[in-house]
Every structure is written in C-alpha cells, then in structure tokens.
Amino acid sequence: MESDVKTVAPDDDVADVFKKFARYEFSGFPVVDEEDRVVGVVTESDLVDLFEPDDETLWIPIGLPPFVDTLTYQVKPPWGDLDLGVDMLRNADRPISEVMSIDVATVSPDTDVDVVLDLLSGDDPNINRVPVVDDDDRVVGIIARQDVIRAFRDERL
C-alpha cells in the first residue's frame, strides 16, 4: 500500500482536478471529506465523460498552462456541436462531487491480499485502485494495480 495518498475534495472544481492529473502520474484520486473519509473516487475517464463521446474520435490536449500537452484524451464530440473550449469553460467550475463515482470499493489495512487481488482483477474493469481506510473510514493508503505488479516483481527478484 502507498501511504502518501493524493486526494481531492468533493467541492474541488473540475479545473483544479485537471491540474492535479497533470502534476501527478495517477489516473484516479480518492475523494475525501473534511475528515479524510472516502466519499468517492474520480478518474481521468470521469472527466473525459464530461465531453460525452458520441460520434467520431478526436485526440486533444487537455492540460492547463503550463501543462498543455501533458494529458491527451480520446473524445468523441458530436461534430455539429464541436466547441471543446466552451465545454471546458462550462465544466471548469463544476464541483467534482457531480462527476465522481460514489460506489467505491475500499479495504482495511488488515485485509487479506487475496481480497485485494480479487478486487483488482475482478469483473469490474473500473477498479484500478483501492483506497485503504481505517475503522472510521478515513483514508490511510491506496493500493493500485501497478503496486501489486511491482510487489510481485520485487518478490521474484
């Protein structure tokens, strides 16, 4: 588990979370309340969904200055209504609580590793990370798929 967890708050706006994705090499963040309790998770794909992919595919840079070109997403806008600048401005101040997923799988620090493996390799392809919470549901760590793979690699070495 990684104990240095980067999180966002439910009232953080979309623009601030885009900046955080540009700064850190994570594809998702736990969303925590003022007492560090997990209330959701927000992923890059949650933010991409703001542009509601429909028709053809367009790859665009999303990063905000000075992070332009750091993030690129596949967006399928309706070509007749294409105005991604307006879409970005329209959604920039939107609170992340309107975008995040609220059905979050969590584990405790003493959860058996097999349970974590089942979650990360299970039928739900959207589970790429599992927040680790204490008895009061406060976030104390996070386990990502890459952490598990790295641990197995290190064990083999």
Image (spheres, rainbow, N blue to C red):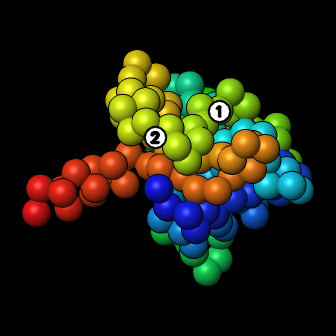
**Residue furthest out toward the left:** 157
Closer to us: 58 or 79: 58
What amino acid is labelled 1 in the image?
Val
What amino acid is labelled 2 in the image?
Asn
Residue drawn 64% across and 56% down? 140
Q: Secondary structure at mark 1?
A: loop
Location of residue 19 (image quadrant) = bottom right
Up-down: is 70 above or below 97? below
The residue indicated by pointer 1 is 104
Up-down: is 121 above or below 143? above
Q: Spatial distance from mark 1 to mark 2, Cα to Cα?
A: 11 Å
The residue indicated by pointer 2 is 128
Q: Position of residue 49 (x, y in %)?
A: 63, 36
**Residue furthest out toward the bottom:** 66
Q: Earlier in the sequence, mark 1 or mark 2?
A: 1
Q: Left or right: where does residue 81 sit relative to residue 117?
A: right
